[in-house]
Image (tube, rainbow, N blue to C red):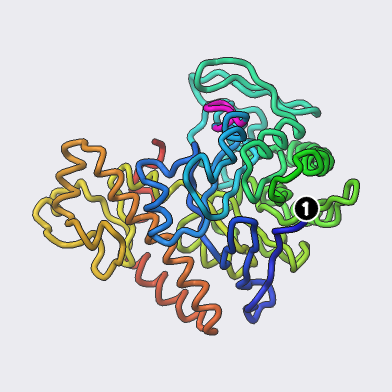
Amino acid sequence: MSGFGFTPRTTLDNGIGRTGTIHTPHGEIQTPAFIAVGTKATVKAVLPESISELGAQAVLANAYHLYLQPGSDLIDEAGGLGRFMNWRGPTFTDSGGFQVMSLGSGFKKVIEMDAKRAEADHAVAPGKERLAHVDDDGVTFKSHLDGSKHRFTPEVSMRVQHQIGADIMFAFDELTHLHNSRGYQEEALERTRLWAERCLAKHRRLTEERVGKPYQALFGVIQGAQYEDLRRKACRDLGGMEVDGQSFDGFGYGGALEKENLGTICGWMSEELPFDKPRHLLGISEPDDFFAAVAAGADTFDCVNPSRVARNSAIYTADGRYNLSTARNRRLFEPLEDGCDCYTCTHYTRAYLHHLFKAKEMLASTLATIHNERFTVRLVDDIRASMDNDDFESFRDHFLGRFYGNSTGPSSVDTTN
């Protein structure tokens, strides 16, 4: 296990939320922390050097996409993900399960956070063909790039992620959504448990075979949707799981989470899991979700949203979110956000970025993404500082009151690109 560990530091009064340090072969991550998403070994439109300069401590790439292009064997030959993309800090890879399921059913690249719609165990987006088929052994799917057929099993996911070479990997799991029936959730949970055992066994063998490589930590993924008993069962199953002397180094909070109950659901899992292992919440980045999840014991987070909405001209500020393409920004010769220390705000104006978006210049995406990523990284850094300073609740109330008192909210921006 050399080179990886977690040291908790400050704990909130509830005994669940905490700060700490994740130790990896490529550096430390001070938690809570936002992990920038570089899906295809790049944060879209932004240099890796710029992501480092804006304060990101680590990046997360996607095993599914890198397996398809350029190939995990090529990345292994290049010396691993960090060397391939010229990133010197810690790296994560997710297992590919989310993309196999979401792209396989033709839906948008987001997880529904509302459980009020009708149940649908095998839903496919209108006009789309189902590209992924799950069985007890794994998933057969067609590439969204060229239609070629592929097979992901727990063993294949482990091999791919070992070749990519990230410091932290995730076990292959079956992603479910809030509209699956209770019966299907139970089936998928058991399938994920059995896959987790196979991931641990394969991870142990690959670690022993790949002599001289830095140790790669493996996180088990907790599913169970909105059901307390299923979430707690998954935590007990994976939290105590050991195969050939190999246990999970940390845990991912996966699947769909009801937004209104996000903190409660995270709390169920944090109460069950070992306190001395890190917990990563997959796929969230809205300010209220950060505060709720941190208080409920989540340590790290990732999400494509800051960069995705930036490419649609949506800008995050402490006073909420606004759209740069609107006419009011055409003659505003001021930063995207007053007081922001990012490269974009210290060098460019709203008027200039408004022009770039209207002219459809690529630089628009680069500059807007730098700001949104810096905003998100800084927010979680400030949350961490407030916890260390015993000022978490006061900071939360002040920040959210200001942000949502002025924001038009996430629904005002298209996030499907």
Indicate whether 274 appears above or below 77.
below
Tell me, yes or no, whether the highlighted magenta stretch contains residue 70: yes
Q: Residue at x 72, y 49 (%)?
A: 218
Q: Residue 30 in the image: x percent, y percent?
A: 56, 67
Indicate whether 62 appears above or below 73.
below
In the picture, which quadrant includes the N terminus?
A: bottom right
* Residue that extends furthest to the bottom in the rendered view of this protein: 390
Q: Residue 366 in the image: x percent, y percent?
A: 30, 46
Q: Residue 180 in the image: x percent, y percent?
A: 67, 37
Answer whether residue 222 is visible to the viewer in this image: no
**Residue identified by numbered label 1:** 248
The range drawn in magenta is 66-72
- Element type at mark 1: loop
Kind of residue sitting beneath label 1: Phe
Tell me, yes or no, whether the highlighted magenta stretch contains residue 51: no
* Residue that extends furthest to the right in the rendered view of this protein: 244
In the picture, which quadrant includes the C terminus?
A: top left
Q: In the picture provided, is 360 more to the left or to the right than 312?
A: left
Q: In the picture provided, is 294 more to the left or to the right than 377?
A: right
Q: Quadrant of residue 275?
A: bottom right
Q: Residue at x 29, y 50 (%)?
A: 368
Indicate whether 200 appears above or below 15.
above
Between residue 80 and residue 227, name the one nearer to us: 80
Q: Total of numbered circles in the picture? A: 1
Q: Residue at x 32, y 42 (%)?
A: 311
Q: In the picture provided, is 310 more to the left or to the right than 280?
A: left
Answer whether residue 78 is visible to the viewer in this image: yes
